[in-house]
């Protein structure tokens, strides 16, 4: 008889963050591998985006924090045949701790990156991570979304079982368009507009390009965030409004079209020891590559797990203006490169980053 799977994650649709979307893909993708799948999550209001909600049982917890945690503990504690379950937590706190208190043995935790950093927060630096996280993570199997995140996990919990399993993408939804007829080279960025994402760095590089190169490109920025107004003011001050286009928030059902119409995707995320903001993996890079669009990413955080240099894209060093300038000039002078790398990008996704492959590897780890 097949084992049963519990996915315990406060983040789950209708939430639309990265962890929620990942847990949703797992809930749907693991259906053929388990006799029963149960999702334990906090109740939320909003549109349901689950692909096949009938494939799992949804257990909704109260929204108030302490009542939510007590109900989660009670539900897991009362499961009698715990040895027949594989338990997967969306994050380590509080899900893994509650699962351990409920006397589960086979606890697996998804690890994403930012939750393992302390930045300048002394509480996180001297207690939360080295004592609390160290204690609970050493009792579980950690499934990291990149080699970078795996190293962070091992540093905090050296006795834990740590497996690096890069994320995947829905390659049947994110796919190339057949009728791309851009008059200019369209560069795109999709992300929350935060300063550590590097929009300001890209803007400065574009601004310093000779006018003949500027006339051949357009930069489309999709996303919202607290740094957006500053970025818009910088664009206006540099008189680049005709070159830089702000597209606002692009909903999920329009994302594939947005990517597919690009010629190049670019995101230059920064990493700093003084901050907890980091790209633990960079799913947007896979989404773009699945659409046959080559990508440029900074060699920071977990991005090297999503972007392979000269195989569907390029990696540059953080904030290296000269390196990005030379690369952009070469691409603009030789646009055939974009088509060649775009073909590689799509093939790489099909061979390495589908959800079917991800779930196969995840099942091996959970066993």
Image (cartoon, rainbow, N blue to C red):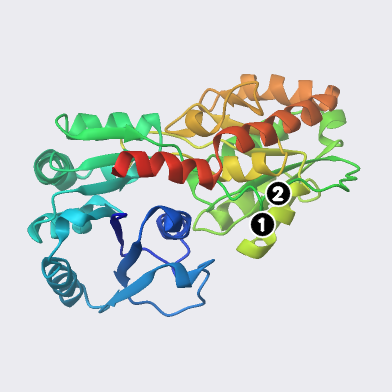
The answer to whether residue 189 is visible is yes
Quarter in which the N terminus is drawn: bottom left
Residue labelled with disc 2:
259
Residue closest to the eye, 164 or 94 = 164
Camera-nearest residue between 209 and 266: 266
Q: Which residue is mark 1?
A: 255
Q: Is residue 59 left or right of residue 199?
A: left
Q: Residue at x 77, y 20 (%)?
A: 330
Q: Is residue 249 visible?
A: no
Rendered location of residue 247, percent (x, y): 69, 58
| Above or below for 340 versus 61 | above
Q: Residues within 10 Å of mark 2 (few under 14, many from 20)?
A: many
Q: Is residue 108 above or below residue 322?
A: below
- Indicate the quadrant where residue 155 lies: top left
Q: What distance separates the C-alpha of mark 2 from that of mark 1?
A: 6 Å
SS category of the residue bearing label 1: helix
Residue ID at (78%, 30%): 338
Which quarter of the picture shows residue 153? Answer: top left
**How far across and how far down the image is residue 76, in percent?**
16, 66
Contact (Cβ within 8 Å) of mark 2 with mark 1: yes
């Amino acid at each position: 008889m097949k084992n049963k799977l519990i996915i315990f994650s406060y983040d789950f649709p209708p939430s639309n963050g990265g962890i929620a979307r990942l847990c949703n893909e797992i809930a749907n993708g693991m259906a053929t591998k388990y006799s029963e799948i149960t999702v334990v999550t906090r109740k939320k209001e909003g549109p349901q985006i689950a692909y096949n909600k009938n494939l799992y049982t949804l257990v909704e917890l109260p929204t108030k924090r302490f009542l939510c945690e007590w109900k989660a503990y009670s539900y897991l504690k009362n499961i009698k045949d715990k040895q027949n379950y594989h338990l997967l937590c969306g994050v380590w706190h509080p899900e893994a701790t509650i699962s351990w208190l409920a006397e589960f043995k086979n606890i697996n935790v998804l690890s994403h990156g930012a939750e393992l950093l302390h930045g300048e927060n002394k509480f996180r630096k001297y207690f939360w991570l080295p004592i609390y996280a160290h204690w609970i993570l050493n009792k579980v199997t950690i499934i990291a979304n990149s080699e970078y995140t795996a190293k962070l996990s091992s540093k905090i919990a050296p006795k834990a079982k740590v497996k690096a399993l890069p994320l995947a993408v829905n390659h049947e939804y994110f796919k190339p368009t057949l009728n791309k007829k851009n008059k200019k080279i369209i560069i795109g960025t999709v992300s929350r507009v935060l300063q550590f994402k590097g929009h300001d760095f890209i803007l400065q590089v574009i601004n310093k390009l000779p006018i003949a190169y500027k006339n051949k490109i357009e930069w489309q920025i999709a996303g919202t965030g607290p740094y957006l107004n500053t970025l818009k003011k910088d664009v206006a001050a540099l008189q680049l409004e005709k070159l830089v286009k702000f597209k606002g928030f692009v909903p999920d059902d329009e994302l594939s079209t947005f990517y597919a119409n690009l010629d190049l995707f670019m995101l230059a995320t920064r990493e700093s020891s003084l901050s907890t903001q980091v790209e633990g993996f960079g799913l947007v890079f896979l989404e773009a590559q699945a659409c046959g669009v080559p990508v440029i990413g900074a060699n920071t955080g977990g991005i090297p797990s999503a972007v392979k240099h000269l195989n569907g894209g390029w990696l540059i060093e953080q904030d290296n203006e000269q390196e990005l300038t030379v690369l952009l000039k070469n691409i603009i002078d030789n646009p055939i490169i974009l088509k060649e790398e775009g073909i590689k990008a799509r093939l790489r996704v099909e061979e390495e980053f589908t959800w079917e492959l991800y779930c196969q590897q995840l099942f091996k780890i959970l066993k």
